[in-house]
Image (cartoon, grey):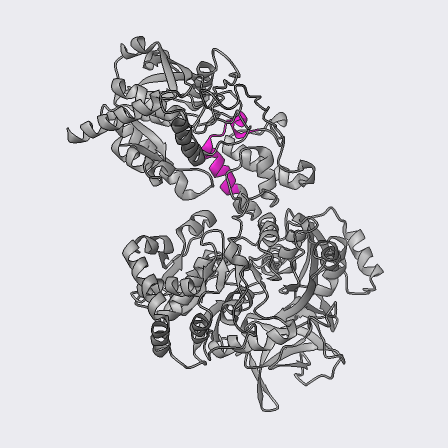
Amino acid sequence: MVFRGLQWVVWAVGRAVMALRYRITFVGMDEALRVPGPYLILPNHPAFCDPPNILVRFWPYFKMRPMLLETMFRLPPLAQFAWVMRSIPLPDIDQASVAARERVAVSVGAAVAALRAGENVVLWPAGRIMRDGVERIGGTRGVAEILAGAPHATVVLVRSRGFWGSMYTWAPTATRPPFIKGLFQAAGLLIANLLIFAPKRSITMTVEAFSTSNRPAPVRELLNPWLERWYNADVCPEVPTFVPHHFLFGPRTWEFPPRPVVPTFDPSRVKEATKIGVAEILAEGLKRPLELDENRPEATFMELGLDSLDAMDVTLQVERRFGFAGPSMPTTVGHLWALAEGYLDAEPSKPPQAVWFKKPTGSLSMEPLGATVTEGILNRVLRHPHDIACSDDVSGAITYERFLIGAMVLAERFEKIPEPNVGLLMPASTAGMVALVGLYLAKKLPVILNWTTGPANMTFGIGKTGVRHVVTSRRFIDRSHIEVPGAELVYLEDIRSTIGRYEKLRRGFAMKIARGPIVRSLLKTLDPDPDKPAVVLFTSGSEKAPKAVPLTHRNVIADMQGAAPLLGIDRSHVGMVLLPLFHSFGYSVTGIFPLFGGIKVVYHPDPTDAGGLVRKVAAYKPTAIAATPTFFGYMLDRARPGDLDSLKIVIVGAERCPDSIFDRAKALAPNAVIVEGYGITECSPVISLNPLDAPKRGTIGRPVQGVEICITHPDTGEKLPDGQRGMVLVAGLTVFPGYIGDEGTPPFRVLDGKKWYVTGDLGEVGCDGYVRFHGRLRRFLKAAGEMISLPAMEEPFARLFPPSDQGPRVAVEGIEMPERRHIVLFTTEDYSLKDANGLLAAEGFRGIIRLDEVQRVPSIPVLGTGKTDYKVLRARIESEHIQ
């Protein structure tokens, strides 16, 4: 009884406020009320302002429970209103996710339960406000599912006329109206009109009730067209109505713009294979083939008959098949094409805060401030507490001091995890780095999992390292559809929900007044041994199953000290980070290196979001970036002149950088020097690097300081002189101590009394000291006593068909069999075996160095690092030619 009284109070206040601006006239209400309930009320949805008017005007008659977006439950005072009115939450389906799909089912179930209990429910079937004056239901399934579950309910349709043209509609600007801004603007206008003088908008609400006998069956193919016909029966499209904002001042008329209907990208750029693939996914979602006139870029999901849940399922399938993730839900076939090819533009990144451009304080040198990673980071906090450490779209720009506070809060929670090794599964982000340092402070060894290798390899990883808990983000898991069998996920969002305002204030105040004692007390608790593992990474698995690689603190710090002089980098530089932490470069070079050395960085979580990366570079003005050639090539595809002008250093590795990247960068990143290097996870990872002041194209540079390279004969093991190709061996403080749980042949060899790591790569050291890379030994085949280099055979095809924004377009792989070998050119292009071998002959390849087959494929498989996944290609050949 008390609760119902509170609802009446809320109704009375809302009714009084709405009456200041809106004059409502009902048509058909009396007749509708003669039909017995319970009632499912279904209004059309022209504006953000029609739901509050519906609620306050219909409440005395129906006492209904509204189905409102979850957003409303997070915005005070709307959250309090939603609670009082016992609203049923509906998920915001701005992005495709499995969790959102499940939450919709829960919402529908709640509505069905309410109707079965005799309660009334109001739902806006379109799920979004009108775009062009026409109510479109499309393939929405919500109403049909509710009526199927509660067939006895009476449907009450409501058609509002007069809202269209309001500042809460698309009509005034042909764009989505700003809801929150509109609320403040409306409050200001009411005050400016002295409340009672506000010009009123005249609204007509036509109401009609339909029992089970006089409405279509609860099947959306029948029900939704019926709803559309009723909503648009009197006028289609509705003509927008302008009402002055002030009774004396301001415009008295308004010219409403037409809404342009054009694709957001050039559909002619889309490959035919992409269109076919998307059409197949759409056909599967529609349960019918796509008609010819439907497979066009401007065709909307509503026209096809896809509702928001169907659209979500289709979007998830496109993301999984083509490997790109979109920032928002597509609405047209063209948007799906753009998503499949990585062209779906993200929402503009948040602009950098003014503090981002604050210059670093103190010395600009990057000298190490500790013998372990954790010690160096803590000392950096002591030395530069108010300098910006990092930034991203979620956290904004944060100082070293704030970074440490966050890590300490997480460490307190991580200490409760019983195992010493804890998994970490995060993209490039502030939260990921804070969690990493939090694990260090909790005395845990971070085991960073590579989600791109699939559940089986992650199961392998946690099994080898004894991981039982994996720190991650619920939002990241939801969007990436990742599963981690055998481990309990620890979500950062759940931890954040346990952090109260008092704890935040207490920790912040303590850090302000006693930063030194707090940090020094943390330093005292650290293990000072630099030869203890700092992290466990995993090899990429491009050639065989991944291996668990522990890197010590000494390994990681030695690699930073060795690489920095060749780059000429100091704390005045600003970094752009896109590589995930599981990537060896992502952990060491773009992860720990900047934080340890005092270089501020901005993170971007998706390396395939080339448009977002380019916009972020243009906004944040970073001077240095590290990426694979594939990812940097994506950026060049999206960049316009001026976008990348701030870049001075572009470090590329993990694969050979095509000449096309160098050539295009001259125009689009004119101030940048592309520095090609060579690294291996087992070596922390940088082995060699082209000096910034003397890069030599076609090489992987010189060994970094403290690293030695030795070339030996692949068969005899003897040392080879400069200029001869052989196996690359590496020695130095950057070399890891050995694999975890690996019982195979040790990867080390003692030569001349020194321990060397056998890389499995072939290369040569020139007389000039620069190293030339010739590929993996595993990617050489023996035939007639001759070594056939698959990378060398692949190179002319890579020049002919350079990587596109979709990744590589060619790959050469082969296998040896007792009687013969079989070498295949895999390509996304239409290319014959005759032409392919002709190209090899023209390049000087003779005799047995030829292709046996050309296979056209929709795409070349790649790993999360952008490297070609030769393991998949080799398995394909073996399945076809080895019985």
Residue 883 in the image, given as x and y percentages of width and height: 59, 58
Residue projecting furthest to the left: 1
The image shows a total of numbered marks equal to 0
Q: Position of residue 550 (x, y in %)?
A: 47, 73
354 or 195, nearer to the observer: 195
Magenta segment includes 629: no
- Compared with 447, 501 (above or below) is above
Position above or below: 680 against 429? below
Q: Main secondary structure of the magenta part?
A: helix
Q: Nearer the viewer, residue 132 or 150?
A: 132
Q: Is residue 311 magenta?
A: yes
Which residue is more in the foreground, 381 or 38? 381
The image shows residue 515 at horizontal and vertical percentages of 36, 70
Q: Quadrant of residue 60?
A: top left
Q: Which residues are magenta?
A: 300-317
Q: Is residue 865 left or right of residue 115?
A: right
